[in-house]
Amino acid sequence: MAGTAALAAVVALSACGAKTNSGSTSDKAAQADTSGDTIKVGLLNSLSGTMAISEVTVRDSLKLAIDEINASGGVLGKKIKPISEDGASDWPTFAEKASKLIKEDRVAATFGCWTSASRKAVKPVFEKNRSLLFYPVQYEGLEESPYIFYTGATTNQQIVPALDYLKSQGKKKIYLVGSDYVFPRTANKEIKAYAKANGMTVLGEDYAPLGSTEFSTIANKVKASKADAVFNTLNGDSNVAFFKEYKSAGLTATRMPVVSVSIAEEEVKSIGSQYLAGQLTAWNYYQTTPGAANTTFVKAYKAKYGQDKPTSDPMEAAYTSVYLWKAMVEKAKSFDPEKVKAASDGITFEAPEGKVTVDGASQHIYKTARIGKVGTDGLIQEVWNSGKPIKPDPFLKGYSWASGLS
Amino acid sequence: MTTTTPQVPSVKQLRSPKGRLTFLRPAAGFAAAAVALFAVAPLALSDFRLGLLAKYLCTAMVAVGICLAWGRGGLLTLGQGVFFGLGGYAMAMHLKIADAGPGQVPDFMQLYGTATELPWWWRPFANPVFALAATVLLPMAVAAILGSFVFRRRVKGAYFAILSQALAAAFAIWLVGQQATTGGTNGLTDIQGFFGYDLDDPVNQRMVYFVIATVLLLLIALARQLIHSRYGELLVAVRDSEERVRFLGYNPANVKLVAYVVAAGMAGLAGALFVPAVGIISPALIGIVPSIELVIGAAVGGRASLVGAVLGAIAVAWARTALSEEFPAAWTYFQGLLFIVALAFLPGGLASLVGIVRRRRASRAPEGEAA
C-alpha cells in the first residue's frame, strides 16, 4: 500500500536525475550571501570530542584574526561575521556541518578542520559546492583539491627537513612510532622511502590506536633497538603516556632524541616539560620565533585569551589563513571562489612565522621549516631553520626517492 | 497519493478484545507516516535538511531491529555498529569500484596502498547484485555465526552486551589498521555515484531519500508482522522467562537467534543506505560510541514499542543536529542531560507516556474504555 505508492514515486523521480559520466552534472555552485554590510565565513572545528583540546585553540585564533580585520574596516568594506560549527571529532559530522555552512548560511569561505580524516570527509562537499576551505594544519601531503587552500606545512616543509636535520646530525638508525591513522601511516611510508635513498635504516615501526595510553611495550622495543633517534608521529593524549614510559625506560634526549611532528607549545604544556626537555620538534612556527609580526600576534592572543595561553603552529597557520583570504578577496575585488582562486597566486603576508607566499598552482603556501628543541620552561627554541621559505611540493615530485609513493 | 484502501477485517481482528477499530490504527499510522515522509517532508524541507532527515531515517532502521532484539527479545545489542558497518562498507566498496571505473582502483588505494589492482576480497563487490545482497546477508551471516555460538552457550545479559561491544571495538580497530585496503580512519569517502546516478544532483539525492523512507516503512511493517506473530509472542516469553519457555519444549537459543539475525540485517541495510545519503562510511561510525548512540535513540523513545523506538531514534539524531547548531560549544551537555532526564524519569522511554496517561485515565474512570 504505502510502500507500493512510494516505490512508484521513486521510479518516477529517478527518471529525472543526472547520470554519472553524462557530462550534465548540475552546475550549481553555492552562492555566497554577499548582500548586506557583513560577510559570513564558517569556522569548522571540533569543539567537543577528543580533538577539541587542539581545535578550540585554532578556533580562538581564527576569531582573533577576524576581530582584528573587523577592527580595521573588514574585507571589501564588509565586516566578517563568523559562524561557528562543531565538527565533534566525528568525520561525517564535519561533512554535515560543512554542507550546512555552505548551503544554509551561504558563507563566503570556511576555515578549519584538523585531522586528515575530517579534511577527506569535507573535501567532496567543498568541491561539489565550489566553496573554499582554508585548512591550517600540517598534513601528509599527496593531495591538491581545487577548493582547499593548505596553509599548514606539507611533507617537504616539515618531515623532509626534519629527516635532513637528523641525517646532518649523523643519526642513521631511526625508529618510527605513530598513532594508527592516516597521517602517521602515510608519513612513515614517506620516511621509509627517504631512509632507503639516504643510507638510513628504519629499525622498527609501531602504531598505537588514537588515544591509547599503553606504551611500555613500545618504549622497551625502542630501547632494545638501540636506534640513534625516534621519529614520533603520535597525536594527542598518547604522547603523555609515551614520553612518561620513554623516560622510565631510561631513555633521554641526549641518548636517543625523539623528533615529534605533532607536539607544539600547547601539547608541551599538557605533557609536562620535565618529560620533554631537550627533545626535538619540527614545525614552521614557534611562540619564540623572532619578528615584529609574531610579537604582535602573541601579545594580542594573550591579551584576548589569557597570559598563560601559548601560541602554536596550527594556531598561527589558522590566523594567517584569514589574512591570506582577505588579501585574495581584495585582489580579486570579489568574494566569488573562482575569482578568489584566480587571484591567489603570489599573494604574500608578513605572518608571525615570517613571510609566506601563496603558490597558486598547488594552493599551498611557501613556508620556512624550523627544527626546535623543547626547553625546561615549556617553550620551544629554534635550533635550525631552512633559511628561506620552501616551495610546497605536496606530491614530492622534486624528490627522486619519492617516485613510487603516489 | 497514499490513501489506504479500507480492508475487510479478519475474524481474528474483529474478535480482538480491545475493540473493533484496532485493525485500523496501524493502517492509519502507516498512512500518516507515509504522508509525512513522502509529501510533507519533501515539500517543507530544503535539500540540505531533507538529506539530514535521510540520515536520521537510517538510524531509525537500526532502531527497528533494536526494538525487536532488545525491546522484545531482551538482547541488549550494544554492537549494532558492526552490522551497520558491514552493510555500509559492502555498499561503499561497490560504489568506490564503480566510481573508479573499469580496470582502475579506488583513489585512496592509489594514495595509501601499493595496490595497483583490487585486493581479492574487494573483487566480488564489483558486481552490483553481489554487493547489494552482501549489504544484508553479510551482517546476517556474521550475526548467525556469532549468535548461534553465544546463545547455545547461554551467554546472556551483561555478558552478551560486553561481547557485542568488544566485537564493535575490534572491528573498528581492524578497519583502521588496514589503511591500504579500507581507507583506515578516513574510511571510504568521496562517493560520487549511486548505481549510475550522480549523487551530486539534488534530484538524485531526493531519490535516495525516497528509497530510504520506503525501506524504513517496509522494515517497520516487517517488524510489526513479526512482533504480532506467534513468533513474536514466543520472543517476549523468552525475554521474560527463558527457563519456562525451555520447559515448554522450545529452544530459546533459536528464538533469540532469529531476532538477532533480523536486527543485524536491518542494521546492515541501514548502513548500506547511509552511504549514498551521507557519502561516507568510516570506523568512527561503527565503534563502541556510535553503537551505544544507536541504542540510546531506541531507549529514549521506548525500546519495546516500534513507534517509540523509531521516533526516538529520529528525535535523538535530530536533537544532536539542532543542539549542536544552536550551541556549538555546549551542546554535548544538553544532549547528555536529555538522556539522563529521559531515562531516569521514563525508563520505558517516551512511548511509555501513552501508557501512563492511559492508566491515569483508567484509574479515574474504572469502567472506561481504555481499561
Image (tube, rainbow, N blue to C red):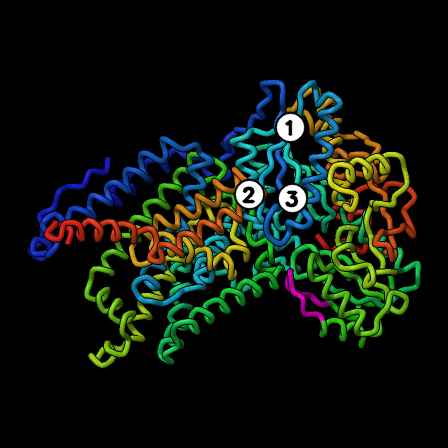
Badge 1 amino acid: Pro
Residue type, label 2 = Ala
CA gap between label 3 and label 1 equals 19 Å
Q: Is residue A211 magenta?
A: yes
Residue with the mark numbered 1: A337
Per the image, label 1 sits on a secondary structure element best described as helix
Label number found at residue A95: 2
Residue A324 in which image quadrant: top right
Query: Residues in magenta?
Result: A206-215
Taking the spot 79% from the left edge, 51% from the top edge, the residue there is A265
- Mark 3 belongs to which amino acid? Cys
Image mark for residue A113:
3
Decide which of A192, A401 is in the foreground and name it. Answer: A192
Q: Is residue A214 left or right of residue A11?
A: right
- Which dot, 2 or 1, sits closer to the camera? 2
Quadrant location of the N terminus of chain B? top left
Q: Main secondary structure of the magenta part?
A: loop
